Image (cartoon, rainbow, N blue to C red):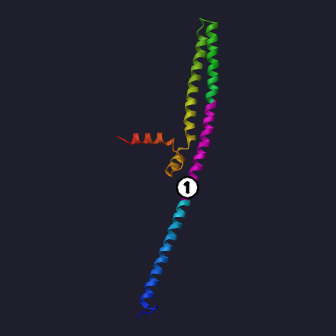
Amino acid sequence: MTDASDPERDSETSGNQGDLLGAFRDIGAAGRSGLAAAKHAGEGLRALVAADIALARSALGRALAYTAVAIVFGVSAWLLLMAALVAVLGAAMQWSWPLALSVVALANVAVTAWAGWRAIGYFEHTRMKATRRQLAQLGIGDGDGDRDDDADADEASQP
């Protein structure tokens, strides 16, 4: 007859309990490690969003400044072109004054085009591409703006 307090049986039971407790401790440690990694990733994403918003804010200010320059030079170009037209109509054979106004007007048009091009370039920074890419990798958001970037990257990587 076997006794319930058999030493072999007690060592097996206590060994199984030790393994089970160790497994629970391992699971708990893995959970804490996963939570710490998630917290670290969240902090990194928060820092990325903050940096991207700061870049977008700065880019928006610059874009507005270049837009203002484009408007000012566009208006002055329009006024100079109208003055040149009036001068040409007023004195049909006097080319020196209208020619001078036309050259200045063309220079203003060139500056207007340059400022508009720069404004468009700075408006691109307001799209927050880095944050959108990271959110798309996490499966958050629709990622509509990233498809063009991915297509460009795929084309560039092909020989």
User: Is 20 on the left or on the right of 122, as rendered?
Assistant: left
Return the x and y of residue 137 as percentages of the image width and height. Answer: 49, 50
Which residue is disc 1 drawn over? 44
User: Is 53 on the left or on the right of 24, as rendered?
Assistant: right
The verdict on residue 52 being magenta is yes
User: Image point 61% across, 37% down: which residue?
Assistant: 62
User: Image point 49% across, 70% down: which residue?
Assistant: 27
Q: Amino acid at mark 1?
A: Gly
Q: Which element type, helix, strand or loop, lies under badge 1?
A: helix
Return the x and y of residue 120 as percentages of the image width and height. Answer: 56, 34
User: Image point 59% across, 23% down: which residue?
Assistant: 108
Return the x and y of residue 86 as percentages of the image width and height. Answer: 64, 11
Magenta residues span 40-68
Q: Is residue 94 above or below residue 37?
A: above
Q: Nearer the viewer, residue 105 or 134?
A: 134
Q: Is residue 25 above or below residue 90?
A: below
User: Image point 55% across, 31% down: which residue?
Assistant: 117
Q: Quadrant of the C terminus?
A: top left
Return the x and y of residue 155 as percentages of the image width and height. Answer: 40, 39
Q: Is residue 132 above or below residue 79?
A: below
Image quarter of residue 82: top right
The verdict on residue 25 being magenta is no
Q: Nearer the viewer, residue 19 or 155?
A: 19
Q: Is residue 60 above or below residue 43?
A: above
